[in-house]
Image: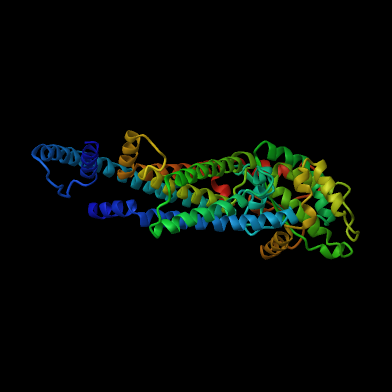
Amino acid sequence: MSGLLERAHTVRQSNVWIYTTMMLSACVSLLASFVLSVDAIELAKNPAANLACNINATISCGTVGISWQAHLLGFPNAYLGLMAEPVVITIAVASLAKVRFPRGFMLAAQVIYTLGLIFAYWLFYQAMFVIGALCPWCLLVTLSTTLVFASLTHVNLRDNNLFLPERAHEAARAGLRMGIDVLIVVLWLAAVVALVFAKYGLALFA
Amino acid sequence: MAQKSNKQKNNKARAFSSATKSEPKTNRSTTESQRELMRLQREREAREKKVRTGVTIGIVAVVVAGILAGLIWLIPALAAKKAAGSDPYALSIGSATAAVTVDIYQDFMCPYCGQFDRAQASDLAALVNAGTVKVDFHIMAFLDDSSNGTKYSTRAANAFVAVAQREPSKALAFNTALYQNQPPEGSNGLTDTEIADRARQAGVSDALASTFASMQKADFVSKSNQAAFDAGVKSTPTVKINGAAFKGDLYTAGTIKDAVAKAGPK
């Protein structure tokens, strides 16, 4: 058992694991963004369009899709995913093929993706507490964005692409070795799921 | 000199990253300092392993707790919900914990449904507001043939289903609004615009009212209609109180209120 855990621990630190996670999460995010973009066009043509993901009053991408929050910048938010996720996929695939990107490049990727993460959770907050409906594809984006962010941050902390001072970098690496990042992600996602159930409960299945 | 200290630093760094690899021995003092470093390294690894085990236990605990919460809370809750409301086409208005459930099977083109509503609506609204009664509407549209081909039953029902699902607090008012000056059987019924206007007057949001014409709930209405027939409903209005058919006078104010008082609260 402990041998298995140690193996899992070693595998988790490997580039193959990290970049594969990043690549798959980014692919999922891209797919979800694509569906949301197509739906956005459908909703623009007909705001009352009955989308396949309108499951009930709570789980309804139509309700979320026609809200002002869904096109905060004047165009559907999902277009941002169509722009950003292919870059992440490229980084992940190239890194799997042992390409090393310059630190400055990775720092820029981290900064931009962090903004994306903040935006994703702002949207989640709006959907939860202001719009009062959840859309499955948006939730998938929230989840996969979190995973991409976690793997990107893992790499950048490990390789000190964030230009941290020596001590901070060493502390960050120690944290990664001990799996504290995984604990944070698991607790975070558990909190998100708990929040959804606490707010909507059985209405999710109505 | 600068180069040498750099090299030492490199050795040090390597010793940090891997304690098991043997380092080239240059001189005695380096070996001693390397031993010291290796000892520190081992100590640190032991410490980290302890924390790592704790973290792993923490992660497993969170995941297991999540699964247990799902098993203990969610599954029984879902089962109870399924047992309580086995009809997926019932549109529930009012508190889920209300002591008495009143089922109403209705078609908006049916004159007796209008008569029923005009007699009982204010009592029902008061009982729902008090939390005593939950009304389960079962929408039917079998009188579609009685509106000169405009399918008024389905059009009105479509609007009502949308309101009951999206803005349930306005559903009773909208229901009553549809029955006031109810179009007679055999007429064209209200136009889509008139239906939306009545909804707005009942407090339904403009955003929702403007979606009626696209008939998003038409499929729900036809399934709901079929489900009601399948459940043995033969005419409208059919009223059930806590599941038992109400056989009294439907069209005199107060009769439903009395029957509710008899049926509950338990």
Task: Tell me where residue A87 appears, x and y as whole percent.
Answer: 52, 54
Q: Is residue B231 left or right of residue A25?
A: right
x, y percent for residue B254: 77, 41
Residue closest to the eye, B180 or B65? B65
In the rendered image, the vertical position of residue B75 relative to residue A180, given as above or below: below
Which residue appears at 67% of the width and 40% of the height? B261
The N terminus of chain B - image quarter: top left
The quarter of the picture where residue B188 lies is bottom right
Q: How is the image coloured?
A: rainbow
Q: In x, y percent, where is residue B232?
A: 68, 63
Residue at 64% of width from left, 55% of height from top? A37
Residue B249 screen position, x and y as percent = 78, 50
Nearer to us in this view, A107 or B161: A107
Q: Is residue A153 visible?
A: yes
Q: Is A147 on the left or on the right of A7, as rendered?
A: right
Residue depicted at 72% across the width and 63% down the height: B222
Name the quadrant containing residue A31: bottom right
